[in-house]
Structure formats: structure tokens, C-alpha cells
Amino acid sequence: MNEINDPTVVADDVVVTMEYTLTVNGEVIDSSEGTDPLEFLQGYQNIVPGLERELYGMKVGQSKKISVSPADGYGEVDMDAFLEISRSEFPDDIPLELGVELDLRDEDGEIMSATISKVEGDMVQLDLNHPLAGETLDFEVKVVGLRSPTEEELEHGHVHGHDHDDYDEDFDEEFIDAVDAEDEE
Ligand code: ZN
């Protein structure tokens, strides 16, 4: 859809549709190729800061290679971001094995991803660092669409596309029950 008043360049409060390929250490680890391009609201850190910053001013059809340092990407590895939890605190249906990824929610309702980094006797160690912490991210992006957000999208600070679910789907409510999910829809 190209409305007459659609934005012409990437700017704050613009919904950007973008094809992308993410390469880390020479290996393609994520790409929109063969699937839907990424749609997001610019200016709300819905994507990593180093990538978002380089998109300002881009037009539809324009491509760019953007290299993002760990500090501007998913952060450096934080040695304090490891948690040790007793086996008995996990629901039965979670396999307690090295490398298993979990989503948990902290006291503020923020979603955190964790990876099981060690299992020793009754102790399960979770690594709360993002799996891409400490990595340089090499993006190749192409802007394929720009539009104005709906009022609701602007209010929420993110897009409400057909494949967007406000992250609730991935949240295992059994695991951390300290906070009720805020239903903002
Ligand atoms: Zn929302």
C-alpha cells in the first residue's frame, strides 16, 4: 500500500519493512530470505541500537551493509548474568539439558531469554546473556516499505502486524509466576 502521505525516508515514528541478512563470524545466522521481511517501528529500539541508528534517512529500495559492534548490538558478555536455580523449581516439561533455551519474565515484566549453561546434580545454571552477546553483527539490509503507524502502534511503541503477538506466545507462564502478564491489547 502506498498512500500519498506515506513517509519517504526512515525516521522516528515510521514503520519500516526491511529485508535483512545477519552474518556472524562469516556465518549467516538469520535472514528474511524465503520468509516475510521484518516490520518494525523506528525509534523505539525494537531492533539493536547500532542497526537502528544507521537506518535513518534510507529510502525504499535502498540497501546497506551495516556492521554493529557488541556494545551497539546485544552487549558484551556479562559474567554476572548467570543464575543458579534448583532443579525442582522448573516445571516438569522443560528438558534440563545444556543449550536449552527458555524465556522468563523478570519482576518488571520484561522478557529475558536464558540458555541452560550448566547442569550439575540438583543445580541448573542459566546464562541470561543474549546468545549473540559479545558478537559483532554484520547486517545486510534493504528497505522495502515505509508507512505511518496506527495510533495504537504508536502508543505501544511497536507494530501490530499479522505475525506479531506481543511476545506472549513464547512466555512460559508456569516458570516465573511472580508477575502477571500485562495484557496491553
Ligand atoms: Zn502492542
Image (cartoon, helix red, strand yellow):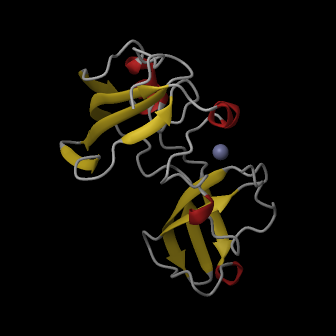
Q: Say if 154 sits above or below 125 in the image.
A: above
Which one is nearer the viewer's eye here, 151 or 26?
Answer: 151
Q: Say if 134 sits above or below 174 in the image.
A: above
Taking the spot 53% from the left edge, 25% from the top edge, the residue there is: 148
Total marks placed: 0
Which one is nearer the viewer's eye here, 138 or 153?
Answer: 153
Please identify the residue farthest to the top as the structure is shown.
Answer: 57
* Figure quadrant of residue 61: top left
Tell me the quadrant of ligand 1. top right
Which one is nearer the viewer's eye here, 181 or 35?
Answer: 35
* Figure quadrant of residue 44: top right
Taking the spot 76% from the left edge, 55% from the top edge, the residue there is: 183
Looking at the rendering, in which quadrant would you find the N terminus? top left
Q: Could you tell me if residue 101 is visible in this image?
A: yes
**Residue 99 coordinates in the image, percent (x, y):** 42, 69
Taking the spot 28% from the left edge, 31% from the top edge, the residue there is: 141
**Residue 150 coordinates in the image, percent (x, y):** 61, 32
Which one is nearer the viewer's eye here, 13 or 7?
Answer: 7
Relative placement, left or right, of 173 versus 126 is right
Please identify the residue farthest to the bottom as the structure is shown.
Answer: 92
Relative placement, left or right, of 170 versus 53 is right
Q: Say if 106 sits above or below 89 in the image.
A: above
**Residue 62 coordinates in the image, percent (x, y):** 25, 20
